[in-house]
Image (cartoon, rainbow, N blue to C red):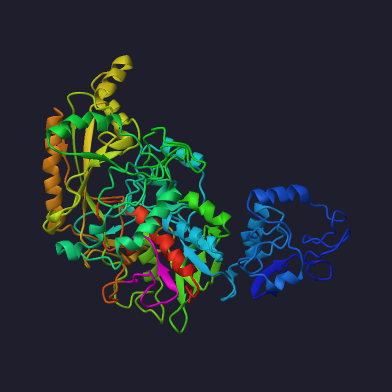
Amino acid sequence: MRQRRAGGGLHRSRARAGGQPRPAALRGGRGAAHACGGVRRGACRRPHRRGRRLATRRGFAGPARAAGAAAARDPLYGRDRGRGSPRTGRPLSLGARLAGAPLHQGARAVQRHLRRLGPHVTTDPTDACDVAIVGSGVAGAHAAHGLAAKGLRVIVLEAGQRRSRAELTRTFFANPVKGPQSAYPPDPFAPFPEDDRYADFYVQGGEMPFIGAYLRLVGGTSWHWTGFADRLRPNDLRMRSLYGVGEDWPIGYAELEPYYERAEREWGVAGDPRFTWGAPRRGPFPQPPVPPSALDLALAPALTQLGLTAGLFSHARNSVPFDGRPACCGNNTCVPICPIGAKYDASVHVAKAEAAGARLIERARVDFIELDAARRVSALVAKRPDGATLRVTARHYVLCCHAIETPRLLLASRQAQAPNGVANGSDNVGRWLLTQANQDCQGLTRDPVLPYRGPQQTSGIEQMRDGAFRRDRAAVGTSFMNSGWSGNSDATRVARDLIAQGLKGSALVEGLNQRVSRHLRLNASAETLARRENRVELDPVLRDAAGIPRPRVTFALDDYTRRGLDEALKVNQRILDAMGATYVTWNAPYLSNAIIAGTTRMGRDPAVSVVGPDLRTHEHPNLSILGPSTHVSAPVNAPSLTVAAMAYRLADRLGAPGGLD
């Protein structure tokens, strides 16, 4: 094996007899040399026709046209600047970019060449790519899509790996634990919280256990989200101005609105224009609404009796076939996984970004951010599962690692130019942690309400989500949980109880139907206010399976949020009473496992924020952060659509002339 440099990047090629590397592909007729080192349709014994089909199927282009192109080709991105393959016009393969591998050998050859590269892969600091993105969830996928569509050279680094929907669905079925993480096999290389083992991941430093659930795989945490696709309301962005609590966002609704519209079109959001949840609209939803569930309809008379109104949620869930994905068929396993792909997840836009020319490097766990003497980011240093190190350079860098991994990475990147961690000169990284606080109220209704038919949540109470009361207590969103008392574990738990009572056979089936069909649970989710003391930091002693310091989380719930939950509990108890429910119970407030935000928040004042309104860090001009970690508040309207909207906003800014400077 012999090394040679071409265009500033490290390449390896097989040596011929005498120690000379094989020539690259040349123009010419019969007998001209191929990239493989053979001669066209003569001495070369490799199956070129089959190889080209395989390469095209997997996104790899055919052989390069001329040896002279090698010097002008970007060493990591692997194509002539601004263009694709000289022969096909398609972007070249990741394997070709990294290793100079013969392009028609397929994915296995690419993997072999990656392994042969050894522990250090160096790329040219100016030619590697325009934008390097860390993370492939909603934030990273949409940013990559928006940037690649503008012709920028984009590389996405993902610590996790691609997983097929069939594989994940089988894992869920086989897992006796049916929580939000149950479809996703543990990954020692890229650890994430596991169901019933949050204490093994988070080091708890506060008065309330923190149980934020997120994933590390291609597509990110969107694989197991509920699918809510609501915009933040304008008032959510002006809490300090309107209600005297919290903080105002440094951007307004009018600036976000066109990007909300684009994100809704990309997802194919299904919604009812009568229910906007406080967010003005200029046009219809892309898809008709997901219909109300049987449980929603059963609750309607009681709500009317109490003077309450319910509305349909907007969903990133197909109500009709869209974008090659089917309509929802009501499997009721939205969390942890939609087995048919009717619910949107970010793997959709990972694929679209790749089709637009972006390149994904999976199993590349970024552990360190390098700074140069001018305190600009000079490289991302990533580990591979085989122990190799990958060093990626770009003109601009975007962190899209969600609200736990982003501060972990910044804090772990301590160096002479950043002794407290990257972007942390003001000690705000990891602080201002946001989530929501939940409380469930449940009972056994007099008549069947028929849960488990349709998505897990389709409707909720319109009241208590906004108003002057937010001066004194938190806004609360109450949802009708179409997943019974305890979600996917209801049937097994109830069956176990009935078997203990001596029921079996048809009597057991009938008893199970009678019980489960009358399970009603109302979930109240309250906003929390950002507090500097609520934070994520690195534990000084304990490490995870990858050897990285574990996240130590401190979170305390204030009286503002507790008062909001108290008010919601009174309303929910009245609903259960109107439904003739018995065995009515409720739990103590607990922190949401679905919402994590705020740990690198936006602001105009560097003393209390990490990034500015444009999402660039205050301290490093070529580093941006995208995702819920930049959010200033965590209102009851879900954050995911805002993340996608902000991604396209960032792509427009970085893709504009001079945007990367």
Say above or below: 340 vs 57: above
Task: Give the left or right position of residue 479, taking residue 51 as reference.
Answer: left
| Residue for point 50% across, 69% down | 381
* Residue nearer the viewer, 509 or 57: 57
> Whole-percent x and y of residue 319?
41, 37
Residue segment shown in magenta = 610-629
Identify the image quadrant of residue 419.
bottom left
Say above or below: 297 vs 477: above
Count of all numbered marks drawn on residues in the image: 0
Task: Give the left or right position of residue 657, taking residue 514 as reference.
Answer: right
Task: Give the left or right position of residue 58, taking residue 315 as reference.
Answer: right
223 in magenta: no
> Whole-percent x and y of residue 431?
27, 67
617 in magenta: yes
> Whole-percent x and y of residue 265?
43, 50
In the picture, which quadrant includes the N terminus? bottom right
Residue 599 visible in the displayed image = yes
* Residue nearer the viewer, 439 or 111: 439
* Residue nearer the viewer, 225 or 645: 645
